[in-house]
Amino acid sequence: MSQRTLMTTLSAVLVAAAALTAAAPADATGSGRQLTDVRITGHFDVNAGQMPENVALLPDGTAYVTFAGARQIVRVTPGGATRVLATLPAPAGGGGNTPVLGFPLTTGIVRSADGTVYVLYATGTSDLTGLWRMRPGQQPQRIAALPANGLPNGLALDERGKQFYITDSVLGTVWTVPTGGGTPTAWSTAPELASTGFLGVNGAKVHDGALWVSNLDQGTLLRIPVLPGNRAGAPQTRASGLVGIDDFAFTGHGNQVLAALNGPNEVVRVRPDGTSTTVLDAAGGLQGPTSIALHHDRVYVLSAAYTTKTDPNLLRARLNGRR
């Protein structure tokens, strides 16, 4: 699939997804925007498939990023310099038939304390779809196979519990995989994770004794308690009306999060009571935000430009106060 065809396909499905989400838009009446010093620190090449999908930060603020359409893992310095660390192998024949999207793509990424990087790869083929590990100085290798008829998307690491949590946006499932790799286990298949026509459960974060996930189609932010024996509790809806929610990040103060709304082209602050306020939009340089990360008071926002097709970028801002 050419990059032009790829972008046209993504544009159509993401616009359709926004229309399918029947939730109300986030409240944008807040007077304090909280984010200042907003600037774009990295521009990427949409024609080369450099649509940034997910991010993991190093202690110095360097970002490890997945480029969805290029099947790549890259390193972006705080100054914006980009270096390709690895390109995952293309499916046989260069195609791949990933469910819903139709092309192979890298999605979630995390980095462990020892510097090992883990990424998800969806191809629609059983030989490549799954969780991949990249140790420093080594080539990536797959350590867990995931269903070829699914779309592994969000990745969260619980180093204390020695588990990965993986969201499947097509199958409406959260999988667990031991940190050493192996056979995945379906941890939760609750109806709150399902799609309504496009993509369901999406972003994932381990926080305060629970796995928090987003559901793009349903426009919800969910908390799933982690029970003894690593059992999944019943999902609790913590916020709704978040049209097109992709990934999110906790601000460091309680359960407050910043969330990327892809279709509406916004970043919103979601309070612990579930209310939300727009803190960043197209005027700040957003081009369809996909993921967010925080480094102290610095906010990193990735925009993939899936629908705008103009300027995939990395935007940085300062978070003023975390309450």
Image (cartoon, rainbow, N blue to C red):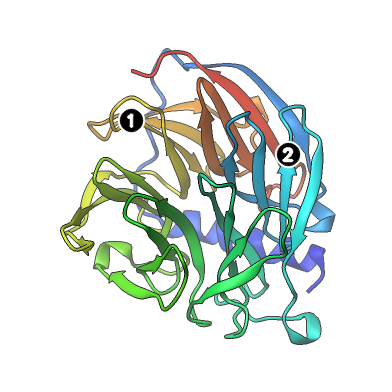
Q: Give, as a three-letter code, the residue at label 2.
A: Val
Question: Image quadrant for the N terminus?
Answer: bottom right
In this rendering, position of residue 285 left or right of residue 238:
right
Q: Quadrant of the C terminus?
A: top left
What's the mark number on residue 256? 1
The answer to whether the residues at label 1 and label 2 have Cβ atoms under 8 Å apart is: no
What's the CA distance linking mark 1 and mark 2?
A: 27 Å
User: Mark 2 packing: few (<14 Cα in 10 Å), some, or many (20+)?
Assistant: many
What's the residue at 59%, 47% (across, down)? 115
Q: Decide if residue 283 is on the left or right side of residue 310.
A: left
Q: Nearer the viewer, residue 137 or 236?
A: 137
Q: Which residue occupies the foreground of this view, 77 or 282?
A: 77
Q: Nearer the viewer, residue 32 or 112?
A: 112
**First of labels 1, 2 by sequence position:** 2
Which residue is the site of mark 2? 76
Residue at screen point 42% across, 63% down = 167
Report the amino acid beneath label 1: Gln
